[in-house]
Amino acid sequence: MNSEFISALQEIVGETHLSVTEADRTQHGRDQSSHPASLPEAVIWPESTQQVSAILRLANENKIPVVGWGAGTSLEGNPIPVRGGLVVDFGRMNQIIEIHAQDFQVTVQPGILYKDMNKVLARNGLFFAPDPGANASIGGMVANNAAGIRTVKYGATRDNVLALEVVLANGEIIRTGSRSVKQSAGYDLTHLFTGSEGTLGLVTEATLKLAPLPEHFSAVTVAFPSVEAAAATVFNIIGAGLNPAALELLGAELIEILNKEAGFEFAVLPNLLMEFNGASEASLNEELALVKEICEAYDCERFEAGLGREARNRLWEARHQVFEILVRHYAGQTWSLTDVAVPISNYPELVSYAVETSRQLGLNTVFVGHAGDGNLHTTSFFSPEDQATGDRTKQLNEKLVSKALALSGTSTGEHGVGLGKQKYMMQEHGAAALTVMRQLKATLDPHNILNPGKVLG
Amino acid sequence: MNSEFISALQEIVGETHLSVTEADRTQHGRDQSSHPASLPEAVIWPESTQQVSAILRLANENKIPVVGWGAGTSLEGNPIPVRGGLVVDFGRMNQIIEIHAQDFQVTVQPGILYKDMNKVLARNGLFFAPDPGANASIGGMVANNAAGIRTVKYGATRDNVLALEVVLANGEIIRTGSRSVKQSAGYDLTHLFTGSEGTLGLVTEATLKLAPLPEHFSAVTVAFPSVEAAAATVFNIIGAGLNPAALELLGAELIEILNKEAGFEFAVLPNLLMEFNGASEASLNEELALVKEICEAYDCERFEAGLGREARNRLWEARHQVFEILVRHYAGQTWSLTDVAVPISNYPELVSYAVETSRQLGLNTVFVGHAGDGNLHTTSFFSPEDQATGDRTKQLNEKLVSKALALSGTSTGEHGVGLGKQKYMMQEHGAAALTVMRQLKATLDPHNILNPGKVLG
């Protein structure tokens, strides 16, 4: 990236919206994962789609790597600029373009943060449901197909994107999809770009499906004698056709830390945290009675339902902060995080296997999962100097991925491929499907400038 | 297609599973649309993915067009072999491979018919919700991203496909997706192939999401003084956050025909046909009270709720047969069918425009729509000899597409592009997005053997 190139970029966005300072480069060199940092050569803040187009055209001509940047909250190294080059920070493209309240839709720029957007939408009684916990940017959520505690009811980001504006590697601007909830007009480009982790194009506008904020809800916490019993309960709740709005599994180690660090008084056992939204208090109570019955069949120890709005909000806020709380609790340690997901009938087996394997490997592992989706996260903490333990956390990851694939699942339910899951792509998809993915990448980004080194390597 | 090629095909499937008779070719020369027939040179009935792979490899080497065939129930000429070549009929690949009842999933071969599959699934209390009315094949539904009266609640086919096995143009077999409901592992090939109308690959296996059969339901019929009032009611029902399991609009002309041909006694006015599924009778009644209130605000004339199971099943059976009933009623006439869809807030304007435009053009038009999805169908009947009227039906189609696009909608909500919607693709997607679609097609099918002449022309 020579000075001529830098000058050309400055001409596009203005001098003050490009930086080569170490502070700015460092801030755009790593996400919230434990993958090592890698700094870009420069950071640029465009303020329009036209500017993004001009930047990409220029980068493509000069074969300079370009990585889109939202809030840096991803967990698999997805936006780390491993080949240097240019980071495009969407912080100045963070506006709500239009709220289509009557259609339960919103059109936004990619830099808007999830929580900021939902605060505005709440005035219309609406919210964007895929909830990654972190205050991610919408562009990042679309790029990574993010999901979270509400996905069990409302789906992942991919299920809630109707239309996109995307700038291609060559600077061309395309629009995909439409605001019609039904669309059969040609190839589904919207879903192809969603979850492509910025390797096929940069999203500059997204139209999202929203949901009405629930009027009647009940949060439930319930403790179980074992993680296995909790997982079996999850399977039975989903299998009974109940429709939880959240269904989270937290291991006993995590519960202990939450009690200590966030002032909760959970039973120090594996817990399920749930929420149900009913059409009325009456139907909600019917649903809860059935939930309780299932929990009792698995010897639950403390069933608390009907938490008020404040207690419920505090519960989910704590759930959202689990990762930060853990990192703080284990200050000075590093960690290895997994993200496998399986069909719900295989969830108990996956969870048992994870518990047993972590024990066998002698790891300090915290278990937490979007259980209702069959998604399990394990986080194993260890000292950065302790390479032997670090290697064993890698073994845990590998074993969990193999087990999840054997159980008809996936190596990554929601964090994306980024850097850490590339080595499993062949095992998960097979050579022929991987060839198709590589062909699509080569077709859309022939010079491999878009987030090179990610997804397919 | 010379005799050597035919012999090679016969070697793959056995002599009895290939036909060049005029009867078989004629049977595979047109769908249920009014697009003219075009016969293939031969029809082949493979019985395994390996055979499909061998067929495609051979066809690709010889650059012979190949069109997949399910039940022939599509409505836009989608499977008509306009360039001749070979039709691959999936009639012998029609098995349920596995019912994953506990996961609410099923894995099937593409030739199985929708209704046959759902009969089997009903024994497990489950069903595949996207309901195209016609007894389509699952392969056809996946290829066309079919939808129907249940889509308002459960989504289209695309929203309910988890994993596919696909044979590419070159004979390679790939598997896409997984049985995990959450997946973030690389590019979304599943959704790319779904709705690609057999132009990117042939689906040989599909894993589908299922839903539990509703326990409590109430069907509702209600008449309105005008189509506009009915459409406004639809918008308000959806806007109130109610969650109909079906919400259909039928124009007065159609009601009159249904009364005559199917023995109903509807008020001869525009009618809404709805269904609601509640968690209990109590919550169902609450929902219905609100629905009634909204209908009354638009001067509804006959509100009948709580139809029994038999009356409800008869209602939807009649709705499913609307197209056949119309074709029978207007025997000897041909027709022009539209399929636009818009965001729900624009549905009243779309419907008013359609009524007014049809009137101005002096057409005999029947109005019917999956109103809850913002999807409107108009069917205009005319004598095959009456070219002037035929031209005016084309004008109606063009005007409705332009209007739908101006209203942030789509030229085709569920019938696909096929032959009839190609001319609107540029208008709908723009040149840059269309170029991307063409590039994807050229990448995956470089010799253009897969359903050539469709989607992108």
Image (spheres, coloured by chain):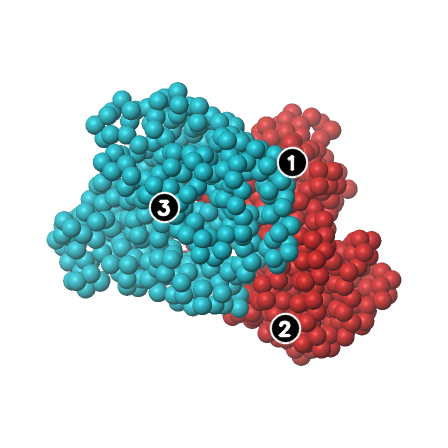
Chain colours: A red, B cyan
Secondary element at tag 3: loop
Q: Please tell me if label 3 and label 2 are on a single chain.
A: no
Asked whether, in this view, residue B55 is left or right of residue B260, the answer is left
Secondary element at tag 2: helix
Q: Disc 1 to disc 2, how far (Cα)?
A: 40 Å
Quarter holding residue B96: bottom left
Which residue position holds label 3?
Answer: B263
Does the image show residue B260?
Answer: yes
Q: Nearer the viewer, mark 1 or mark 3?
A: 3
Please report, as a chain letter, where disc 3 is located: B
The amino acid type, in three-letter code, at marker 1 is: Ala
Who is closer to the viewer here, A29 or A263?
A263
Which residue position holds label 2?
Answer: A232
Asked whether, in this view, residue A282 is left or right of residue B95, the answer is right
Q: Residue at x 73, y 44 (%)?
A: A115
- Measured along the vertical axis of the image, is residue A388 above or below residue B319? below
Please report, as a chain letter, where disc 2 is located: A
The disc at residue A101 is 1
Does the image show residue A141?
Answer: no
Rendered location of residue A455, percent (x, y) = 55, 53
